[in-house]
């Protein structure tokens, strides 16, 4: 079962997701700096770069947004030309264009935007121009996949695209159709605003953090939402009543004397999860090292000496490491290329077991990821989509002494 724990302050809201008594996700949002992903803007093209097959678009933020050629072509791959045209054939400087943020500004880079518009609802994601039906891969029963695809195909209009979300499993045709109608009406409003607005201007803002968590994370498997703000708690209960009346009773207002994150040991778990060196239950440990695009995770036996053979000792450590890595990738929201240096195993079946178990434990991750497998050097390679800077990074800063390297030169 899952618990969602929400801490509200005047300027910031923080959310923690706990599964089977383990912290697996954490996010926060400043009231003055809400996330940009999902927002739609009418922007103006300010630069077209054929050499990069990209353009920069002014959407009214400090830095111009980056628009790649693939995000200008038709969202349906089968409808794209076999040979990509030059970006200069698709866009001109001064042209006004509606774009949607798909990646937050990170470091010195501006936001990445797309013309592949998508509006998430409770049961589905609506894509006004995608012209295809998709069903979440996490819905494994083929009969249910076919049922949902049939519902979506009959409900959509020509040219529209729909992706049925995981939570749509078992949901009624009427609920799915109602969700689609609401999203379609929202898109019509966005188009109408765009027609009468001058760029750069914001056309649509995605929901705030609490509204998103209810939309995206609350399911029949969610035991409780525990929140320390009565007003926000009432809003969550009201939203849940619209989805399923009996769910509103699962909202609990926290009234304890100590801070909510301290009471549920969220702060303690965050402190541990963000260490450079993280100990496993059996005495082994993980070491995390980051660059801008790459994260390397090293697995070590540490204090664990095992009880039988060296191969079994290594295998047991790697199993614990794989499970903890799957959790920490979600919790630390690590994106980009990820290389895991598991301890070398001589038995091929053990290597396959580690790969299979990591894939199984990663199924709960809502962020798109791909496990590529073992490299020739015996490293496990995977990728995980990076959409935004992690919530905790706003509370961290590089050490003034080592400047983020973790080491300093000795006196000579």
Image (spheres, rainbow, N blue to C red):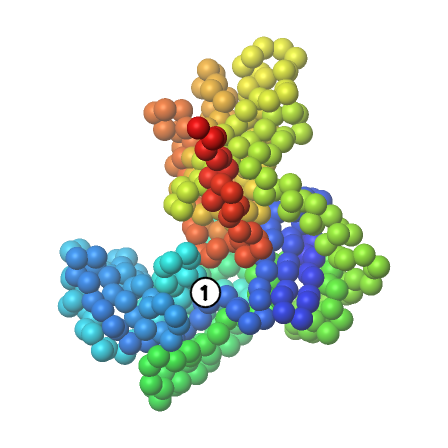
Horizontal side of 52 relative to 365 (left or right) equals left
The relative height of residue 88 versus residue 186 in the rendered view (above or below) is above
Q: Is residue 271 visible?
A: yes
In which quadrant will I find the C terminus? top left
Q: Residue at x 36, y 28 (%)?
A: 375
Name the residue located 50 percent from the left edge and 66 percent from the top edge: 35
Q: Position of residue 297 (x, y in %)?
A: 48, 34
As rendered, which of 10 and 136 lies closer to the eye?
10
Q: Which residue occupies 62% across, 66% down?
A: 12
**Which residue is the site of mark 1?**
37
Residue at x 21% of width, y 59% of height: 53
Image spot of residue 294 (x, y percent): 40, 41
Looking at the image, is 367 positioned above or below residue 123?
Answer: above
> Which image quarter: residue 378?
top left
| Residue 149 at x, y percent in the picture | 44, 60
User: In the depicted view, which residue is nearer to us: 256 or 97?
Assistant: 256
> Under tag 1, what secondary structure?
loop
Residue that extends furthest to the front in the rendered view of this protein: 412
In this rendered view, identify the residue nearer to me: 85 or 107.
107
């Amino acid at each position: 079962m899952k618990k969602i724990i929400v801490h509200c302050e005047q300027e910031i809201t923080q959310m923690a997701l706990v599964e089977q008594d383990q912290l697996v996700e954490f996010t926060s949002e400043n009231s003055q700096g809400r996330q940009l992903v999902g927002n739609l803007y009418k922007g103006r093209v300010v630069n077209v770069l054929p050499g990069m097959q990209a353009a920069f678009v002014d959407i009214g933020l400090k830095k111009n947004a980056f628009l790649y050629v693939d995000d200008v072509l038709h969202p349906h791959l089968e409808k794209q030309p076999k040979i990509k045209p030059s970006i200069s054939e698709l866009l001109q400087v001064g042209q006004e264009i509606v774009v949607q943020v798909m990646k937050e500004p990170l470091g010195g880079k501006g936001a990445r935007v797309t013309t592949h518009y998508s509006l998430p609802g409770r049961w589905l994601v609506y894509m006004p121009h995608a012209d295809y039906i998709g069903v979440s891969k996490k819905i494994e029963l083929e009969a249910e996949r076919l049922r949902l695809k049939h519902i979506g195909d009959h409900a959509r209009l020509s040219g529209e695209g729909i992706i049925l979300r995981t939570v749509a499993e078992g949901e009624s045709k009427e609920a799915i159709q109602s969700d689609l109608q609401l999203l379609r009406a929202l898109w019509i409003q966005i188009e109408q605003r765009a027609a009468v607005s001058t760029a750069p201007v914001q056309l649509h803002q995605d929901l705030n953090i609490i509204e998103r968590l209810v939309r995206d994370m609350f399911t029949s498997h969610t035991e409780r939402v525990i929140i320390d703000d009565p007003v926000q708690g009432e809003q969550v209960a009201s939203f849940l009543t619209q989805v399923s009346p009996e769910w509103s009773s699962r909202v609990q207002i926290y009234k304890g004397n100590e801070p909510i994150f301290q009471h549920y040991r969220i702060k303690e778990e965050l402190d541990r999860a963000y260490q450079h060196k993280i100990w496993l239950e059996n005495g082994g440990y993980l070491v995390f090292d980051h660059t801008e695009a790459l994260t390397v995770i090293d697995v070590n036996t540490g204090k664990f000496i095992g009880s039988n053979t060296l191969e079994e000792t290594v295998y047991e450590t790697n199993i614990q490491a794989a499970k903890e890595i799957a959790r920490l990738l979600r919790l630390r929201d690590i994106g980009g290329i990820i290389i895991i240096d598991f301890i070398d195993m001589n038995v091929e079946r053990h290597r396959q077991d580690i790969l299979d178990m990591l894939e199984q434990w990663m199924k709960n991750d809502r962020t798109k990821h791909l496990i590529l497998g073992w490299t020739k050097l015996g490293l496990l390679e995977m990728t995980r989509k990076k959409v935004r800077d992690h919530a905790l990074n706003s509370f961290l800063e590089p050490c003034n002494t080592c400047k983020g390297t973790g080491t300093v030169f000795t006196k000579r």
